[in-house]
Image: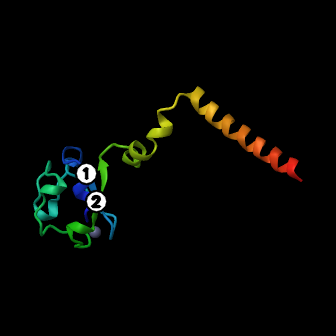
Amino acid sequence: MSEQSEQAVDTQALDRYECRACGYVYEPEKGDDKHDIPSGIPFADLPINWRCPVCSAKKQAFTSIGPAGQVSGFRENLGYGLGVNTLTPTQKNLLIFGALALAFLFFISLYGLQ
Ligand SMILES: [Zn+2]
């Protein structure tokens, strides 16, 4: 998958990876006892022939779910929610009431045409 190569290497060093086939999660802090993978090995450094210890899916079947202890969706919020999250409450209110006022004016103008 090309999406993995687009991520910066340093931020995914200790990311956990979830098997999309069975839901098993590889945690770098724990390693993988079944395949004698010691703790501290990033998913990217696992052998190319490493497979899911539960369902034997290949590495390509795994997807990054971020470092342990992070709220799921954290990365998505950083990327997609930035525009709104950086607004102050006052700006948000202005945005909401501005949109309402516009909608109201639009409705009134339609009403006036009839
Ligand atoms: Zn699996």
From the image, tell me which residue sits under label 1.
Answer: 7
Image coords of residue 80 (percent x, y): 43, 46
Count of marks overlaid on the render: 2
Q: Residue furthest bottom?
A: 56
Q: Quadrant of residue 23?
A: bottom left
Considering only vertical position in the picture, is 100 above or below 76?
A: above
User: Looking at the picture, which amino acid does disc 2 mark?
Assistant: Glu
User: Looking at the picture, which amino acid does disc 1 mark?
Assistant: Gln
Q: Nearer the viewer, residue 47 or 22?
A: 47
Which of the image's four quarters has the N terminus?
bottom left
Considering only vertical position in the picture, is 41 above or below 69?
A: below
Is the residue marked 1 within 8 Å of ligand 1, measured from its CB?
Answer: no
Find the distance from the CA under tag 1 to the CA under tag 2: 7 Å
Image coords of residue 111 (percent x, y): 86, 49
Dot 1 falls on a residue whose secondary structure is loop
Image coords of residue 49 (percent x, y): 12, 69
Residue 3's mark? 2
Which residue is drawn at the image coordinates 51% and 31% (left, top)?
87
- Left or right placement of residue 26 versus residue 86 in this view: left
Considering only vertical position in the picture, is 33 above or below 51?
A: above
Q: Nearer the viewer, residue 4 or 63?
A: 4
Q: Nearer the viewer, residue 19 or 2?
A: 2
Residue 87 in sight here: yes
Q: Residue furthest front?
A: 113
Which residue is drawn at the image coordinates 76% and 46% (left, top)?
106
Image coords of residue 92 (percent x, y): 59, 33
Q: Is there a contact, CB below 8 Å, between mark 1 and mark 2?
A: yes
Which residue is drawn at the image coordinates 71% and 40% (left, top)?
102
Question: Neighbour class for label 2 at 10 Å: few (<14), some, many (≥20)?
Answer: few
Dot 2 falls on a residue whose secondary structure is helix
For ligand 1, the image quadrant comes to bottom left
Residue 88's mark? none
